[in-house]
Image: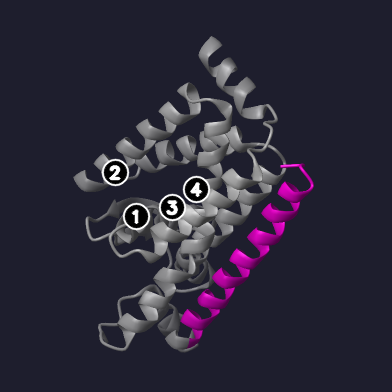
Amino acid sequence: MELLGEIWRRATAVQQPPPVEVVLGAALAAFVLVVVPGTWPAARMLVTIVHEGAHGFVALLAGRRLQGIRLHSDTSGLTVSKGPARGPGMVATLAAGYLGPAVVGLVAALLLAAGHALALLWLVVLVLGLMLLQIRNLFGLVVLLGAGAVMVGVSWYLSAPVQSGIAYLITWLLLIAAPKPVVELIGRRTRDRSGTSDVDQLARLTWVPGVVWAGLFLLANLAGLAVGVTVLVPSLLTGRG
């Protein structure tokens, strides 16, 4: 109980923001991780974790039964839920994946703007722990355990300025990376007509063409990035954090 109390005390405390240079450096680092081909797979795995987590979370909200999550070495993933094959619950579950990273990035930005960088890190630990309960393949298990161990170490042992810098890096990474999988999806659909992607399934459920769904997801993620910038940058310039 003392350990949980200490975690709660740290997580609910307000942290001072790191210097503006550190936060902008975190944004630049996130941008490099996304655009450089050699580092993109690692960044994309973070996006995939959030993507699949969003599928699972919305499935539960929609009253569906979550049957498992898989993460694959090619940075793809799969979330399986049981429930009605059609209807708004299924549509919401499918749509949540490509919207998840931007939405989570915005929530993270709001937490940082309020001075709760450490709370964000502990929330990441909590989400990884909950996803562990649903993981159904060895690679996914290793990825989540490794990520969770790193985040516990960061949240418990590192100094407050470093913790804040890492929290900003994660946030920038989600916001900047969110549109790229949608762009990849659009390019892939011109070559692959298997009809198994989220947007293809949405097209069959709603009669809205897949290309329209993909365009909407791209616009939403770009809007999320723009809003995230407007949340983070003014708070830094005013020294609020």
Instruction: Using the rendered image of the protein, determine whether residue 112 is visible from the camera's viewpoint.
Output: yes
- The residue that appears at 34% across and 52% down in the rendered structure is 67
| In-image side of 119 versus 204 (left or right) | right
User: What's the amino acid at mark 4?
Assistant: Ile
In the image, residue 228 sits, relative to residue 118, either above or below, namely below
- The residue that appears at 54% across and 54% down in the rendered structure is 27
Of the 4 image quadrants, the one containing the C terminus is top right
Q: Could you tell which of marks 2 and 3 lies nearer the N-terminus?
A: 3
Q: Nearer the viewer, residue 74 or 205?
A: 74
Residue behind mark 2: 143
Q: Is residue 239 magenta?
A: yes
Residue behind mark 1: 45
Q: Secondary structure at mark 2?
A: helix
For discs 1 and 3, the disc positioned in front in the rendered view:
1
- The residue that appears at 37% across and 55% down in the rendered structure is 43
Could you give the CA–CA distance between mark 2 and mark 3, rounded to whole angstroms? 14 Å
Determine crowd level at label 2: few under 14, some 14-19, many 20+ residues with C-alpha closer than 10 A. some
Tell me where residue 48 appears, x and y as whole percent: 38, 57
Magenta part, dominant SS = helix
Residue behind mark 3: 53
Determine crowd level at label 3: few under 14, some 14-19, many 20+ residues with C-alpha closer than 10 A. many
Could you give the CA–CA distance between mark 3 and mark 4, rounded to whole angstroms? 16 Å
Give the magenta range.
Answer: 212-241
Residue behind mark 4: 170
Q: Which dot marks residue 127?
A: none
Q: Residue furthest top?
A: 2
Determine crowd level at label 1: few under 14, some 14-19, many 20+ residues with C-alpha closer than 10 A. some
Q: Is residue 99 magenta?
A: no
Contact (Cβ within 8 Å) of mark 1 with mark 2: yes
